[in-house]
Image: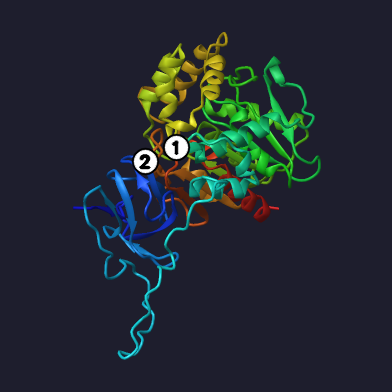
Amino acid sequence: MPVEVIFPRVDMEMTSGRIAQWHAKDGDTVAEGAPLFEIETDKAAMEIDAPASGTLRLQPLAPDATIPVGAAVGWIVVPGETWSPPSAPPTETRPRAEAPATAPAPAAAPASAPVATETKLLRATPLARREAAQCGLDLAAIVGSGPRGRVRHADVLEALAGQAAAAPPAPSPPTVPLRHGVGLHLERFGPAKGVPVVLLHGFGADLSNWRAVWRLLEAGRPVVAVDLPGHGRSAPAGVRHAELVDAVVAALRQEGIERFHLVGHSLGGAVALGIADMLPGLVRSLGLLAPVGFGPEIDAGFLAGFLAAERAESLLPWLHRLVADPALISDGFLRATLRAQTEPGRRDYQRTLVASLFPDGTQALALRGILDGLAVPAKVIWGQADAIIPARHARGLPPHVAVHLAPGVGHLPHLEAPALVARLIGELAAAGQ
């Protein structure tokens, strides 16, 4: 008998959804495992494959119909089988008023039956379309890595990062000399005037991790990205939390940056909290992405594996743990990270830093209390799929701190959802002027 094409459940709370796009039309021959249609819910966008090979026959559906989980949206008929149309569509849409019994409804083709796909139809996932629109990217210029050249979310992020890398950067100062001969590197982007957004990266990264976000921010306000001590192009500056805070504050002061919006990721979030505590009158708003210091748990295996990896093959699995979608870790990202980690003295410093801040695989810093006395706008952004620091650390924060939990995002929201992060940072900066 014909194989039913079922509208699936893609998350535990899902009861219904909608079909965003069909990849085949009624009567087409489809192959088992080939992309058949895309669904959208409030939390997810996902491509659904054909469950069998044969001729696709579609259930009549109203445009943008809300479809209950488990309902049949079509059938796949193998040669030699018979098939007859269903009597009613499986939707949750409100039915139209019935015609009088004496006036039978005319036979007509379903309004939502998919039309023939045009030769030049641009193939892209709903998530890729939304991200490209928010970032101002032309989907037609992006090479898709999905089936039949389909543009995926990872392709949009890679195009965004490539665009930022190709763009001529704004003039940036050289490495900033600090007291006692210690130096931090920072770079400036965007207009020269205005209260800047200062970006602090996480452990094992560098300021380039913010590239996709600063490209979205720099059109409207100045941006300053800083390499933390012992990362990127910055020299080591101690391994205690207070020493990291002092080093960044000294760099900003020597650059004449007196007032600023502050955003920190992971370890950079812990440094940002320390700066906000030290300079309450100068930090105009505070954004924290999966920050260190809100709870004791941290993935000690990641820290050890990341620091031990000396080849691309051994580093890649640990980088995959940073994101919800491993496809986001491109070969270029992998190679750049490996090059940075093999610079002389880098691993030794970072091992000492880990021993100081995360003894026995535990977060030694307890920084939640800083938020209690915070008098500026603040947001905490966390990926629900974070495998490095659990998102539950965002529970129980003071009510004046906005918490944003991003579904389908891991430990790197600024890489996995740059448009969302840039929008939230922009909201913070506007509120803290």
Q: Amino acid at mark 2?
A: Ala
Q: Amino acid at mark 1?
A: Pro
**Element under label 1?**
helix
Residue 34's disc is 2
Q: Residue at x 63, y 45 (%)?
A: 135
Q: Is residue 65 left or right of residue 346?
A: left
Q: Is residue 67 left or right of residue 330?
A: left
Q: Residue at x 45, y 50 (%)?
A: 397
Q: Residue at x 60, y 20 (%)?
A: 237
On screen, 53 above or below 401? above
Residue 90 % position (x, y): 30, 66
| Residue positioned most to the left | 1
On screen, 87 above or below 176? below
**Element under label 2?**
loop
Count residues near mark 1 (Cα–Cα under 10 Å), then give few for <14, some for 14-19, many for 20+: few
The answer to whether residue 44 is seen in the rendering is: no
Q: Is residue 14 left or right of residue 114?
A: left
Residue 147's disc is 1
